[in-house]
Amino acid sequence: MHYDPIKKVFGDAARSSTLFRRIFYGLLDMMFLRAWYVKRALRTLLDGRKEAFTLFDAGSGFGQYSYFLARRYPQAAIHAVDVKDEQIDDCRGFFTRCGLGNITFRVEDLTQPLHAEEFDVILSVDVMEHIEDDVQVFKNFHRALKPGGVVLINTPSNLGGSDAHDDEDESFIGEHARNGYGADEITEKLRSARLRVNTISYTYGPIGMAAWRLGIKYPMQLLNVSKAFFVLLPFYYAATLWLTLVFMYLDYAGTNSTGAGLLVTAVKE
């Protein structure tokens, strides 16, 4: 049971107007706990920067993090890439209509060494679990960063990441090369690419995973059974949204000793 086909339905609907796309971004930011964590990490990393800087959104997807970055940090020059042509074309059109000129979009393969000492910061959100040759990507990140540059990575952990609970389980998300990383594993792989881990923390602890299932997984499972359940979604969320958001806040405000997600920053040595 996967949510990618349903996610695409919402993404296609958001293409119909600039307003709908902004609403779509707002819903992603509200309903996905990873967005809460990633945005907080970005604010911690970037809010003190007054001078111009360069940023690489490595796997921009629908473009919601690029949108946040381009608006919050007008002094940044942002380069956003994805392997899917339709995603890049879609983002180009939307960002042009929004008048955000501090960002470029390109179709790129992260396994290819296309950049050399160009970026102060690299952002990679839920991308690495999709790529088999992850060490090569980490090496390319090292190559692309300026000296002292930082990479921020959000990815599922191997402790129930992607809502899979052992090596035999199929990821609920789908299209994954791995269900998640162990903290030691990703630290060693980054070290082998000469990227020194600066911070590493767990996200989606037990209460965060309860929020994920209540707010995302269960509705997606119903929609995979029949698209007719779309008409029931407002009633479902009317009953459950408040509890989902409370669970998300408790996870976000606390400290997780373990969790289904990992948030990592690493510095170019």
Image (cartoon, rainbow, N blue to C red):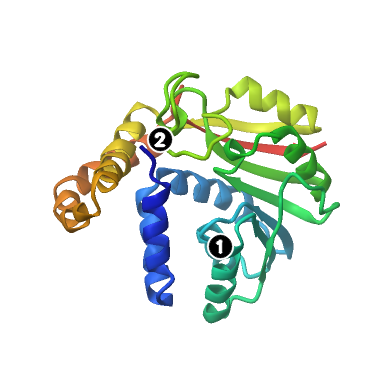
Viewer-side residue, 77 vs 9: 9
* Residue 123 coordinates in the image, percent (x, y): 63, 49
Amino acid type, label 1: Gln
Image quarter (top left, top right, bottom left or bottom right) of the N terminus:
top left
**Disc 1 to disc 2: CB gap under 8 Å:** no
How many residues crowd around disc 2 within 10 Å: few (fewer than 14), some, or many (20 or more)? some
Please indicate whether residue 114 sits to the left or right of residue 61 in the image. right
* Residue 240 coordinates in the image, percent (x, y): 18, 45
Amino acid type, label 2: Phe
How far, Cα to Cα, is label 1 from label 2? Answer: 22 Å
At a point 22% along the width and 56% down the height, the residue shown is: 230
- Please identify the residue farthest to the front as the structure is shown: 226
Could you tell which of marks 1 and 2 lies nearer the N-terminus?
Answer: 1
Task: State the residue position of label 1.
Answer: 87
Q: Secondary structure at mark 2?
A: loop
Q: Is residue 100 above or below residue 176?
A: below
Viewer-side residue, 22 vs 136: 136
Image quarter (top left, top right, bottom left or bottom right) of the C terminus:
top right
**Disc count in the image?**
2
Look at the image and tell me whether residue 65 can be seen.
Answer: yes
How many residues crowd around disc 1 within 10 Å: few (fewer than 14), some, or many (20 or more)? some
Please indicate whether residue 144 sits to the left or right of residue 214 in the image. right
Q: Secondary structure at mark 1?
A: helix
Please indicate whether residue 163 sits to the left or right of residue 244 in the image. right
At a point 44% along the width and 47% down the height, the residue shown is: 36
* Residue 188 coordinates in the image, percent (x, y): 71, 23
Look at the image and tell me whether residue 146 can be seen.
Answer: no
Task: State the residue position of label 2.
Answer: 172
At a point 40% along the width and 30% down the height, the residue shown is: 163
At a point 44% along the width and 71% down the height, the residue shown is: 15
